[in-house]
Amino acid sequence: MITNDGQHEKPAGYVTVTFDAGEHGKLSGQTSYYVNPEATQVELTAPTVQANTGYKFKTWDKALKGQFKSDTKITAQYDKYDDVIPVGPNVQKPVDNISNNNTIGNDLMNNTSDLNNEVTESSTANKQKDLSATEKKTNSKITKRLPQTGEKENSVLGLLIIGLSGLLGIVDRKKRKDK
């Protein structure tokens, strides 16, 4: 393998392998090689890719290792970033695994739908792209959830107090009757 650095002429019978930046980036380093087409296992060193703003280098469109029997152009491939990328600690979507069943408080949970719709409308207004099928499926499974206030423990305590008060009232009434 002889590099095409401008100082060597292409040897007879050799093929040229050229790296191309594609539409969304620039290359630095060696971008062309003269390769013996009879060599069965050649490994080329790719140039460094600098992707343009809004793009990320993904891969090359052809293998860099193997046999090159004819002139070959190897082009950089890119992934496009979204126009707006949210950052920060509160970016993750909430996970909610509580189901909406027919228990006490179900009516209250159903009446929170207006608030949930406002949140959904607010977050979709800031989104610039359509939701993927996975995101749509995930969003459709999200159920309504009330804040966890510890009311279950308070109601048990309240029932105990009412029960004891009633028991004391019966004992007090019995004492008065016996007098």
Image (tube, rainbow, N blue to C red):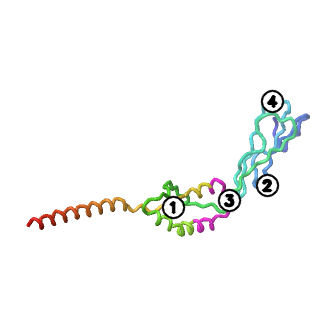
Label 3 to label 2: alpha-carbon separation: 17 Å
Disc 4 packing (10 Å; few <14; some 14–19; many ≥20): few
Please name the residue that numbered disc 2 is placed on: 23
Which stretch is magenta? 120-136
Q: Nearer the viewer, residue 18 or 4?
A: 18
Looking at the image, which residue sits at the far left? 179
Q: Which mark is residue 136?
A: none
Label 1 to label 2: alpha-carbon separation: 46 Å
Please name the residue that numbered disc 4 is placed on: 40
Looking at the image, which residue sits at the far front? 177
Instruction: State the image coordinates of residue 111 (x, y, percent, origin top left).
Output: 50, 68
Circle nearer the N terminus (1, 2): 2
Which mark's residue is nearer the viewer, 4 or 1? 1
Q: Which residue occupies 57% across, 67% down?
A: 117
Which mark's residue is nearer the viewer, 3 or 2? 3
Circle nearer the N terminus (3, 1): 3
Kind of residue at disc 4: Thr
Please name the residue that numbered disc 3 is placed on: 82
Circle nearer the N terminus (3, 2): 2
Circle nearer the N terminus (4, 1): 4
- Label 3 residue SS: loop
Q: Which residue occupies 75% across, 46% down?
A: 29
Kind of residue at disc 2: Glu
Which mark's residue is nearer the viewer, 3 or 4? 3
Label 4 to label 1: alpha-carbon separation: 63 Å
Please name the residue that numbered disc 1 is placed on: 144
Disc 2 packing (10 Å; few <14; some 14–19; many ≥20): few
Looking at the image, which residue sits at the far right? 12
Circle nearer the N terminus (3, 4): 4
- Label 1 residue SS: loop
